[in-house]
Image (cartoon, helix red, strand yellow):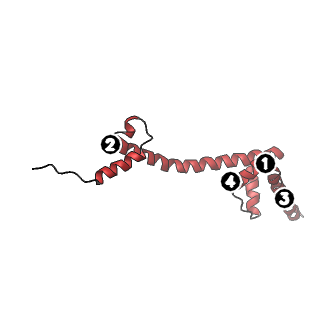
Amino acid sequence: MTRIRRGYIARRRRTKIRLFAASFRGAHSRLTRTITQQKIRALVSAHRDRGSQKRNFRRLWITRINAVIREREVSYSYSRLIYDLYKRQLLFNRKILAQIAISNRNCLYMISNEIIKEVDCKESAVKI
């Protein structure tokens, strides 16, 4: 009985996996079984780290905003700024606030001063 030539489907699948792992080092880019394991591991890590990346960027933005706000006034902080923004129903994105803090500090100072003035006026009106 003559030898049957296999089709191209398995080879195509392996080639696709090899292209994914082309930049890996050593056997992780050469051996099919190891490549498959490394692909699963890489995708798991990518999925997990997308969430942590979002958390890390949010922490960075909060730190930047807080640093710029505390530079001007000692008693004013990030949490007070966000609280006052919500009270005035100004929905600023933390990413945008951080960009304003880095590129144009005076603009952030103006925003915080306006908020402080309005909050102080309302508090004094309530006391009277």
**Relative to 40, residue 90 above or below:** below
| Lower position in the chain sequence, tag 1 or tag 4 | 1
**Which of the 4 image quadrants contains residue 88?**
bottom right
**Can you identify the residue that label 1 sits on?**
69
Q: Tag 4, which secondary structure?
A: helix
Residue 30 horizontal/vertical position (percent): 36, 39
On residue 114, the disc is: 3
Q: CA distance from mark 1 to mark 4?
A: 15 Å
| Lower position in the chain sequence, tag 2 or tag 3 | 2
Q: Tag 3, which secondary structure?
A: helix
Q: Nearer the viewer, mark 2 or mark 1?
A: 2
**Which of the 4 image quadrants contains residue 24?**
top left
Q: Tag 2, which secondary structure?
A: helix
- Label 1 amino acid? Ile
| Lower position in the chain sequence, tag 2 or tag 1 | 2
> Which residue is more in the foreground, 104 or 12?
12
On residue 95, the disc is: 4
Residue farthest to the left, as pictured: 1
Q: Residue at x 45, y 41 (%)?
A: 23
- Label 3 amino acid? Glu
